[in-house]
Amino acid sequence: MYIQPNMLLTPTEKLIKPYQCSFIVIEGPTLKGKLSLEGLEIRYDSFYLSQLILNPSAQDQPLLYGFLGNDVTFLMVKAKYVPTDPNWAVETDQYIEYYFEDDTTQVRSMGQLLILTGNSTNRIPQIYFNNPNTTYSVYLEVLMANLPQSSLVATQYTQDSTFSGLYYNSIISDTVYYTSPATTGSTKLMVLDIEDNVDIIIPYTNIRTITKTDTTTLLIGLDTDEKVKLEFLSAFNCDQANSRIHWVLESQTTRTLTKVLPEIDITPPVFSWNDVISGTTTGLTSGSTTVYLLPSGTTSSITYTSTILKETFLSGITDAVDGTKSIYDASVLIYEFNGLVSITGITSSGICNAIFTVKDIATNSVSSQKFIGIYSSEIGGYYLTGYWDGSTWTEIYIEGS
């Protein structure tokens, strides 16, 4: 005799979940099994609570252990798969990947909960996460704890912590081997003392501002009210360190700082120029002088301010370390021909002298001088301008090219 089951009833739900200091196994309303956690005690010295959002397709996202150091003895990670989104209900999509800093080629996966424990001699190394999902974010809640470790020399910064007597290469970074794509990068700054011991660790994700407060001091503003003051032995060391820090932050997944790399930056930026009508004349300098020709206007005069001159002459600025810089990073000093005091802009016909200058973060600078002829008329390719020699106005026609 065959008994047909009731097809109207939905299957009972089978779950594992925490309940009263236990993990229980249930099937519908029925308790099927229980693992008691009573008596479980995990010792710790310091703990740290954190939250982390893994954006869609996030790769090589470090879970920073805060002031606990580079490794811990307890780690619990709870993953929430966008609980407010009812469309993300596919069980096979609800996972993330992780790997350890000391074994980047072994990528593992987790679902909703990950618990790792160690002891004082076998600690949990730095961990990194990937989110394989291309559509949804994953929210992580993390509890970390650590036992005391005598080798932990890096300390958490306190309000306005100050580190003095620094060289430019007293600032280095960690080294991280990313998997997708395969690159070598970094996640945090480390400040070394005179014996090359790590005094402090500053995760990149905590840095909000870097301010040069005087010739030998950098102030790093963090994502809290805390600030870290770095005092260097000289202005040169301060400028080089400032350049190194900005350089590594510009491309964290492909750059690291060591004691020797990158090398000292002593190369100034390079100007790129637009094509502007120009011609040559004599009498302005000891030889032939190139003059760049700009119109004075017809119905009304044009004021050539420093900003307009940057936009007219400069097509770009590049630096070997800083990369592409804005043309507005340059400064322009404008002088009337034979004038000794700079002016704010050119308002009438005549020849002026403009000096373009730009500095990189390491304070390497470059300057370029341009003689500019504001012409009042143009006849057959000849442009009428002129200059004062102190008492007399001299008109000159310059053939443009």
Image (cartoon, rainbow, N blue to C red):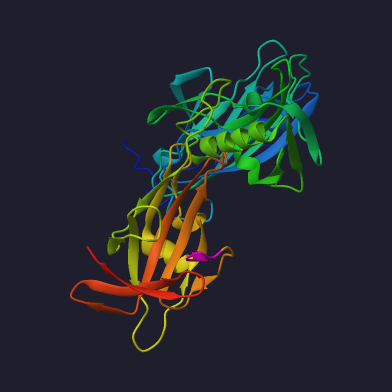
Percent from the top left, x then y, of residue 269? Answer: 45, 43
Q: Residue furthest bottom?
A: 299
User: Is 369 situated above or below 44?
Assistant: below
Q: Is residue 25 visible?
A: no
Residue plotted at (76% across, 22% down) = 42
Q: Is residue 261 visible?
A: yes
Q: How many numbered circles are shown? A: 0
Residue 92, quarter of picture: top left
Magenta stretch in the rendered image = 335-339
- Relative placement, left or right, of 263 versus 155 is left
- Relative placement, left or right, of 229 versus 59 is right
Could you say which is closer to the camera, residue 362 or residue 357? 357
Queried whether the magenta region covers residue 336, the answer comes back as: yes
Percent from the top left, x then y, of residue 214? Answer: 73, 44
Residue plotted at (45% across, 36% down) = 59
Q: Residue furthest front?
A: 391
User: Is 124 situated above or below 235?
Assistant: above
Residue plotted at (33% across, 68% down) = 293
Percent from the top left, x then y, of residue 76? Answer: 64, 31
Residue 377, quarter of picture: bottom left
User: Is 177 situated above or below 223?
Assistant: above
Which quadrant is the N terminus positioned in?
top left
Percent from the top left, x then y, of residue 283? Answer: 37, 61
Which quadrant is the C terminus positioned in?
bottom left
- Relative placement, left or right, of 40 versus 118 is right
- Relative placement, left or right, of 316 versus 255 is left
Could you say which is closer to the camera, residue 17 or residue 137? 137
Residue plotted at (65% across, 22% down) = 71
Residue 72, quarter of picture: top right
